[in-house]
Image (cartoon, rainbow, N blue to C red):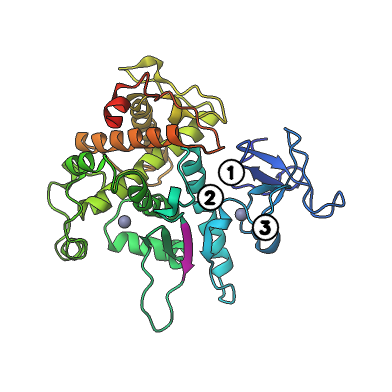
Amino acid sequence: MPVFFENDHCVRCQYELGFNLSTAEMVGVAPSGHTGTSGVVGGPHNSTVRHCLNRTQHQVCNWTLSLADPEPFCVSCRLNVVVPDLAVQGNLDRWRRLELAKRRCVYTVLRLSLPLGASTGSRLPGLSFRFLGDPPNGPVVLTSHDAGVITMNIAEADDDERERRRVSLHEPYRTLVGHFRHEVGHYYWDRLVDKTQHLERFRELFGNETLDYTSALGNYYAQGPPADWNTRCVSAYASVHPWEDWAETWAHYLHSVDTLETAASFGIGLATLQNPSSAISVAAGGAPMGIVPFENLLDRWIPLTLALNAINRGMGLPDVYPFVIPPKAVEKLRFIHELIALSSLQSSSGFHVTSSLTPENSPETQRLIA
Ligand SMILES: [Zn+2]
Ligand SMILES: [Zn+2]
């Protein structure tokens, strides 16, 4: 019986389940009080974990913590600084959907060994989240990033409202997980690019970010994207400003590594004509994004998206991945891949990611370090 990332109960026996981040697997969690200790667990690794407080109080989380962890909240929930006002009808369901999308994003961030906490010497703050609804008398809450704080307008958690916005903005794709992946991209620009030796290369690929952001955004909404946006960007919105181009491209990178890992966990592999041995063959719990060079990742991602799109069309559904990546955007994705590999190498994160991109065997990485 397969168990999914979103599950909180076994559908066969109703046993409580939770996600154990330290082993990257779903484990059984004894119900509160079952063994005399709240939430004691016997997982496959005989680890002892307990539910996150956001599960026991609100059923909005399915991650677990070590019994020894003094924190009440899991790694994902402890990033929250403002949660939805639960006195408002519907907000509990909105919050649950938001947390699920957020956990997917946080999982991939951790899988890539990217930092969540403040940088050394606190030059940069850690990542945090605010979930806000539009106040009755305004102003409208903008989904945005500011110095590590990501604000999400919780109206986006309503399918009808999000779809209305998608259509009115002429977007082919608009999802909660896409929002999270985009906004964390802004945060990691601060961490991986700004005030580093990589800024010059960033400007070569994405353009000069000192361009006035507010007027660039205003121009985009007044005039639409430039006609040639699809020759250099993953999406029309990416043409707004180099910062948005980075965040959009970053989101696509996270889309690809998360989806490839999910495909691999089901044993789904697609060989390409150019590279017949490139089929995904990584066991569940492995790290396909870390063990393949960038070309191999792309070789797997493109055929997978073509297949997924065709399957969806067979069911009368929209394309899973309604994008075409132009060669210039491929180079941007490669830059992001290399920066993440470098960051992963320098990370002391306890969450394992296997990376073959060591300075010894990756010429591109050596070039970036230099
Ligand atoms: Zn949690
Ligand atoms: Zn943005």
Identify the residue under disc 1: 5
Identify the residue under disc 3: 72
Q: Nearer the viewer, residue 162 or 33?
A: 33
Q: Distance of mark 2 from mark 1, alpha carbons?
A: 9 Å
For residue 206, which quarter of the picture? top left
Residue at the image position 48 percent from the left and 49 percent from the top: 116
82 lies above or below 299: below
Asked if residue 119 can be seen in this view, the reply is no
Q: What amino acid is found at the position of numbered circle 1 in the picture?
A: Phe
Circle 2 crowding by C-alpha within 10 Å: few under 14, some 14–19, many from 20: many
The question of residue 131 being in magenta is answered with: yes
What residue range appears in magenta?
128-132
Q: What amino acid is found at the position of numbered circle 3 in the picture?
A: Pro
For ligand 1, the image quadrant comes to: bottom right
Identify the residue under disc 2: 103
Q: Nearer the viewer, mark 3 or mark 2?
A: 3
Circle 1 crowding by C-alpha within 10 Å: few under 14, some 14–19, many from 20: some
* Upstream in sequence: badge 3 or badge 1: 1
Q: Main secondary structure of the magenta part?
A: strand
- Residue at the extreme right of the image, as rendered: 36
The question of residue 241 being in magenta is answered with: no
Q: Is residue 72 left or right of residue 226?
A: right
